[in-house]
Amino acid sequence: MSDFSLSDLETIVAERAKASPEESWTAKLVAHGQQKAAKKLGEEAVETVIAAIRNDRQNLVDESADLLYHLMVVLKIADIPLQDVLDELARRTSQSGLQEKANRRDP
Ligand SMILES: N=c1c2ncn([C@@H]3O[C@H](COP(=O)(O)OP(=O)(O)OP(=O)(O)O)[C@@H](O)[C@H]3O)c2ncn1[C@@H]1O[C@H](COP(=O)(O)O)[C@@H](O)[C@H]1O
């Protein structure tokens, strides 16, 4: 088992975003802009859903990796640090998901 973390992936994405689009998929996505990157994220999300429904364990691992990678690229383009997402998750640990849903004020 590796000790690779999402934080390591964030560092790699930030570094590769500066490379030439001819030599890096990350740089290519960043050069195309948020619309293309978000579209790829959506495709990977759908592929992850399909793998989950099919109960295809290996494919679910592979598609989840694609999904997390493309999420990191979308966050990079939006200039949102991973820590902001982790802070939001940490904030949510103070109550259960069901509690949060019940307390939600719909517009
Ligand atoms: N984790 C990933 C990662 N996961 C998926 N992908 C790429 O995401 C792309 C999307 O896969 P698809 O099959 O959907 O692509 P496609 O069909 O060719 O896409 P289209 O051109 O049709 O839109 C593929 O080119 C994958 O190689 C990734 N590319 C990069 N990384 C990480 O980023 C690092 C830097 O990569 P480069 O930026 O390419 O140097 C790598 O060392 C990895 O750590």
Image (tube, rainbow, N blue to C red):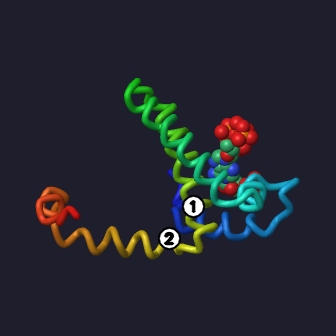
Q: Residues within 10 Å of mark 2 (few under 14, many from 20)?
A: some
* Residue type marked 1: Met
Residue at image point 83% right, 57% down: 21
Nearer to the camera, 38 or 94: 38
Residue 100 placed where, x, y %? Answer: 17, 63
Q: Is residue 106 above or below residue 56?
A: below
Numbered disc total: 2
* Circle 1/circle 2 CB separation < 8 Å: yes
Q: Position of residue 96 (x, y in %)?
A: 16, 62
Q: Is residue 84 left or right of residue 4?
A: left
The residue under the point 47% across, 37% down is 48
Q: Position of residue 107 (x, y in %)?
A: 23, 64
Q: Amino acid at mark 2?
A: Leu
Dividing the picture into quadrants, the one containing residue 97 is bottom left
Indicate which disc, 1 or 2, sits on the residue closer to the N terminus. Answer: 1
The relative height of residue 39 versus residue 72 in the rendered view (above or below) is: above
Q: Determine the image quadrant of residue 74.
A: bottom right
Please give the residue where the numbered disc 1 appears in the rendered image. 72
Provide the secondary structure element on which disc 1 rests: helix
Q: Element type at marker 2?
A: helix
In terms of image quadrants, where is residue 12? bottom right
Residue extending farthest to the front is 107
State the residue at coordinates (73%, 69%).
Answer: 15
Q: Is mark 1 within 8 Å of ligand 1?
A: no
Q: Write down the residue under mark 2.
A: 82
Could you give the CA–CA distance between mark 1 and mark 2, rounded to whole angstroms?
8 Å
Picture coordinates of residue 14 (x, y %)? Answer: 68, 70
Residue at the location (53% across, 45% down)?
42
Which residue is at the far top?
A: 54
Establish whether ligand 1 lies closer than 8 Å to the Cβ of label 2: no
In the image, taking residue 22 as reference, residue 79 lies left or right, namely left
